Image (tube, rainbow, N blue to C red):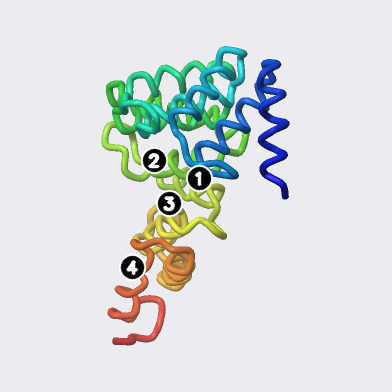
């Protein structure tokens, strides 16, 4: 790995309007890879690449505005960039746009619109879209609950490695929602969730031990 040479060649390509080089340079300034972290420089590079039509850069412009990195936080601008990239078929932007509608960031809360964009994103196997779609099917208060579909979404979101998805699967199995009640399976999913860093999974695993659900009581 030679980041100094990488930057040098990226800069040469960027001067010739190579959108991939512009994006890679932006990443390096954003994360401090071989250079000091400089969000303002990163967003200028993303902006150049976006003007050249880079879907990645357009989506990342949305992220920078969403998080307030190098610019003042502006959810409306973030939503505009996500939407622009989403309409071009960029799956990460479709997922992010869905989340904006889900949480009412820069736009009115609209679960139906969120679901529409999540469904577009999952066609390209964006795991976060599976998780968020499952979350809406489980907890969305203006749409009909669909626990069976929620379970399927959580499983596809990474039921073998995603701690948050595993915790939700544990809840569904414990409560018999969308699947027969099974304390042993719930315990297993809470255990996996805890091992994968989910705070809720850790709490639920503790509660299972405390009450002897799905395992021997252990206080």
Q: Secondary structure at mark 3?
A: loop
Q: Disc 2 vs disc 1: Cβ atoms closer than 8 Å?
A: yes
**How far from the left and from the top, in percent, is residue 177?**
38, 54
Question: How far is the residue under mark 2 from the one under mark 1?
Answer: 9 Å
Label 1 CA crowd tier, 10 Å (few <14, some 14–19, many 20+): many
**How far from the left and from the top, in percent, is residue 187?**
42, 71
Asked whether the viewer can see residue 48, the reply is yes
Earlier along the polypeptide chain: callout 1 or callout 3?
1
Q: Secondary structure at mark 4?
A: helix
Q: Disc 2 vs disc 4: Cβ atoms closer than 8 Å?
A: no
Disc 3 target residue: 178
Disc 1 target residue: 153
Question: How far is the residue under mark 1 from the one under mark 3?
Answer: 12 Å
Question: Which residue shows up at 29% across the image and 80% down it?
Answer: 210
Question: Which residue shows up at 69% across the image and 30% down it?
Answer: 10
Question: How far is the residue under mark 1 from the one under mark 4?
Answer: 21 Å
Q: Secondary structure at mark 1?
A: helix
**How far from the left and from the top, in percent, is residue 5?**
72, 39
Disc 4 target residue: 204
Disc 2 target residue: 137
Earlier along the polypeptide chain: callout 2 or callout 1?
2
């Amino acid at each position: 790995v030679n980041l100094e040479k990488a930057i040098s060649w990226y800069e040469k390509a960027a001067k010739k309007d190579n959108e991939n080089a512009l994006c890679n340079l932006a990443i390096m300034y954003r994360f401090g890879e071989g250079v000091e972290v400089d969000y303002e420089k990163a967003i200028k590079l993303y902006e150049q690449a976006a003007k050249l039509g880079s879907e990645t850069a357009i989506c990342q412009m949305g992220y920078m505005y969403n998080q307030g990195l190098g610019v003042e936080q502006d959810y409306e601008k973030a939503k505009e960039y996500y939407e622009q990239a989403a309409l071009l078929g960029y799956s990460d932007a479709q997922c992010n746009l869905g989340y904006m509608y889900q949480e009412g960031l820069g736009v009115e809360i609209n679960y139906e619109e969120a679901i529409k964009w999540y469904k577009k994103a999952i066609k390209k196997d964006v795991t976060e879209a599976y998780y968020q779609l499952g979350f809406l099917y489980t907890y969305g208060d203006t749409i009909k609950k669909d626990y069976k579909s929620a379970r399927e979404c959580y499983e596809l979101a990474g039921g073998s490695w995603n701690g948050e998805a595993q915790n939700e699967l544990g809840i569904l199995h414990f409560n018999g929602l969308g699947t027969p009640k099974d304390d042993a399976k719930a315990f297993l999913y809470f255990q996996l969730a805890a091992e994968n860093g989910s705070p809720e999974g850790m709490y639920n695993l503790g509660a299972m031990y405390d009450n002897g659900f799905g395992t021997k009581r252990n206080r």
